[in-house]
Every structure is written in C-alpha cells, then in structure tokens.
Image (tube, helix red, strand yellow):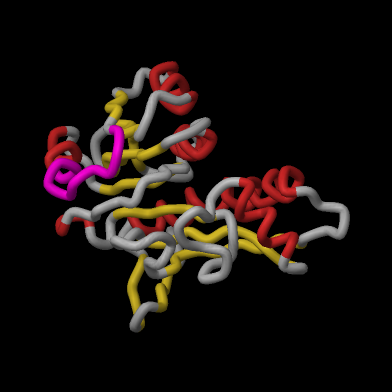
Amino acid sequence: MAGVARLGVMLSGAGRTLVNLAGAIARRQLRAQIAVVIASRPCAGCDRARERGLPVVIEPGEIPAPRLAALLAEHQIGFVALAGYLRLVHVPPAFQGRMLNVHPALLPAFGGPGMHGLAVHRAVIQAGCKITGCTVHLVDDRYDSGPILVQRACRVLDTDTPESLAARVCEEECRAYPAALAALVEGRVSFIGRRAVIAAGE
C-alpha cells in the first residue's frame, strides 16, 4: 500500500485492539497498514494476527531499545501502537513521539505499574468514581505517563461490575484509538508544553 504509514502493533493478550485497528484501516478511517505484530508471549492476539496474514514476532521479556529499533527497522515501521502490551517499552530514539498506547481510564488517574485490565475498572468502582473512560497517549519510558492525545469518557453506573464497565470503556477505546493514531500519522498533532493540539482532518 503506497502512501500509507507502516504500523507495528505490540500486544500481549486477546488482540481486540489489533482487530479494532485493522477494522479502521479497512474502513479507510486510518491510512496505515499493519506491517508486523510483536507479542510478549504466545496469545490469542497472535492467532488473530496470523488469521489476517500478518507477520508475528514473539519477544518475551522487556525488549532493549536497540533490539526494538532493529526489529522495527527490519519491517520498515513508521509508527507503533501498543495494544494491550504488558511490558515496559524502552522507546528507541527514532520512535520518540511515534509510539501510542491506549489506557482504560482517564489518566493520570488509575495508571502505573499493575494497572491494566480489570484491575483498573475494579479500582475505579472502589474509588466511587462517577466518570471514567479511556486515554490515548504517547509512550515514554514510564508506564502511562506520556503526553495525552485523546480522551473519551463514559459514566460509571451504580450497578457496574468491573466486567460491565470494561465493556463500556472498550467501546470508547474503539473510537478514540483510531482517531488519535490517524491524527499522528497525518501529522496533525502539535504541542504546547505537554498539551497536545490536534488539527482538524480533511
């Protein structure tokens, strides 16, 4: 696919975000092609990638920045999307500002080591929050601390369980992540300090 960004996706689990991004590409909401999937372990996400004919590389443990840089260069990757990747990422210098993650809460609340999956939603409910959502942010060398690009919110219901809240937040992730990634690959993101400013698309 000429004229589109080559995207690397890093995952550790079911691959729902991979499927979401692939769907956005198919609907032409995101001008990219997924060129490689990097997994921290064998998982359902690897199977979903292979079903779509995508190359899969399994790299257990934290990947040193030089190794990650070489792997991304090998596949001519321009941007990286973390998709439920559960290892700390050591960002190669060439990919500063070119790696994104989606977190299932409104950062900076409910982020950091160990805050992933149902643990996040359980913590939100236990804290008595009335609003939660998702955050798409740039990746740096710490968990959940990079500049925020897009946030979407949803209500926390009195009847919510971690599972029901996770499902509702996932709906917001499916909207937020392709939109943020499209803005990044189209060069529509600028910064005032740490505040991201996203210009309107065509």
What residue is rendered at 31% in x and 25% in y?
56
Position of 195 with respect to 157 (left or right) is left
What residue is rendered at 51% in x and 63% in y?
111
Position of 163 with respect to 172 (left or right) is right
Spot occupied by residue 14 in the image (x, y as percentages of width and height): 52, 31
Q: Is residue 3 above or below residue 22?
A: below
Quarter of the picture containing the C terminus is bottom left
Residue 67 part of the magenta segment: yes
In front of the other: 20 or 106: 106
Q: Quadrant of residue 199?
A: bottom left
Residue 24 part of the magenta segment: no
What residue is rendered at 49% in x and 24% in y?
44
Kindly give the residue lying farthest to the bottom in the view shown: 193
Spot occupied by residue 52 in the image (x, y as percentages of width and height): 42, 20
Spot occupied by residue 152 in the image (x, y as percentages of width and height): 61, 62
Quarter of the picture containing the N terminus is top left
Would residue 169 be visible to someone looking at this image?
yes
Give the magenta range.
Answer: 60-69
Kindly give the residue lying farthest to the right in the view shown: 159
Position of 95 with respect to 159 (left or right) is left
